[in-house]
Image (spheres, grey):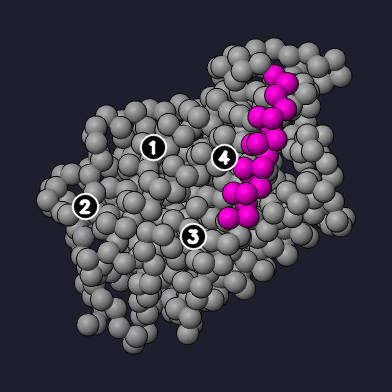
Amino acid sequence: MAVETTPPPSGTLTPVTLDAGGAPAPLKRSIGVVGGTLLTLSCLTPASSLFVIVPGMFETLGSGTALALVVAAVLCVGVAFCYSELGTLIPSAGGEYAMVGTLMGRFMGWLVFIIATIVVMIVPPIIALGTAEYLTSIATIDTMWAGAAVMILATIMGLLDLRANAWVTGVFLALEVIAAAIVAFLGFANVNQATSTLIKPEVVVDAASNTTDPLKMGLLIAGMAGALFALQGFSTAVYLAEEMENPRRTVSRTVLWTLGLGAVILIVPTIAISLGAPDQATLAGGDILGLVEGWSNHGMATFIGLCIALAIINAGVVMVIQNSRVVYASARDRAWPEPINRAFGKVNRFGSPWVSTLVVGVPGALLCFVPTTLLGEVTGVAVAALYLVVALAVLVARKGAHKSTQAWRMPLWPAIPVVLIVSMIYVLTEQPTRALLITGGVLLLAALYWVFYLRPRQETRWNIKLMADDS
């Protein structure tokens, strides 16, 4: 069939089939729940979050880190329900922007695309930057250059066959799960802190004297963005919807399985580390390999470090694979001038959108030279904003033509999205001003692009399409 040239009315869902005559070639359906879960769990990369993001949380939240992760996981259940419903209602490689754009109009879809782009461009380098620290036991490597090297390697791997990558990343995922399990075992076997510190958390106010104060609620809420960031990744299963067999059934299962497994792999070792640290000052230092060496020996710390370095590389590969699908989908939906659309839509002989993969991977390597604190703050704001808009979209997903559309339906609707909306607004109000300003500035530029380029060309630009799902 030829490409649809007349844009569908805003808010309608129109399956189309694209030909090869200048339009992006369709992606191949080749993965099921197991393959999708392996890829998505590798993108969530819970062990990498444990060793890269959680140490920073220990510094600010102390023994309250585990509590923040548990609260975030509960919120993420609601998020997972939202993504499962929308991802089966609107299975598209465009992910959030396709879902929101179809339900709430193309302008909102465009803004969500930009928010999602912030996340997909920044998260991989943040994770990649953790590589050098976990290779220090065998070599001294500059953190930024190591991160950039991981991003380049991930980009090369992302150009290959998706099915092969699913199983390769599965092997690497097994290694990081083993590392997390060892850390959990060692922590629980060397308990030094009372379990009450998990319920009534403390933070260090003077490291020299190991003086602590109770964790204040405001600080816990502010840390929720980081906790959501640590668990972020389960929702990216929707980016693979066009490459999943029977997506209307497979997507929801993949999202929910990934969140459940990821939360356990992340939270259990975090609790063990919190209890096994000799004191709160050591915990706040975030040196997990140092703790492992103290609990066991240098050889074990070296093994854990190597496993985590491989896990980080694995995460980079999967993030580049999944995030490139968003760029690919934006070209199919004609978000850019035509030469750019044609380039982003090119698919190689492995079925990979190779130009889109390069567009994600190469800038990611450059972002490794930006301070990680700033990258983390901006990502936290973007993730919370993304979840907020997705929850809003769920509220309109059961109206009009979409009410009778076949899809997985969440329980307790509309209570879950309403609670999620209120929670995300509260989390956003507690974030650093500079991160809010940077994110707001990017969205302002995106709105100007919409006003001066996309909207005047709405007959031929930014027409969100849904591929036939063959389910």
Q: Residue at x 67, y 68 (%)?
A: 152
Residue kind at label 2, given as amino acid type = Ala
- Residue 197's label in the rendered image is none
Query: In what element is the residue under mark 4?
Result: helix
Would residue 104 be seen by someone viewing this image from the given angle? no
Q: Position of residue 259 (x, y in %)?
A: 44, 44
Residue under label 1, please give it. 77
Dot 1 and dot 2 residues touching (CB under 8 Å): no
Identify the mark nearer the N-term, 1 or 2. Answer: 1
Compared across the picture, whether 297 is left or right of 260 comes to: right
Identify the mark nearer the N-term, 2 or 3. Answer: 3
- Residue 266's label in the rendered image is 4
Q: CA distance from mark 1 to mark 4?
A: 15 Å
Residue under label 2, please give it. 407
Q: Position of residue 349 (x, y in %)?
A: 47, 85
The residue segment tinted magenta is 174-193
Residue under label 3, please give it. 39
Vertical arrangement, residue 287 with respect to residue 195, above or below? below
Residue kind at label 4, given as amino acid type = Leu
Residue kind at label 3, given as amino acid type = Leu
Residue 188 on the magenta span? yes
Residue 369 on the magenta span? no
Vertical arrangement, residue 196 with respect to residue 450, above or below? above
Q: Say few, some or many: other residues with alpha carbon within 10 Å of mark 3 (under 14 / 14 to 19 / 20 or more).
A: many
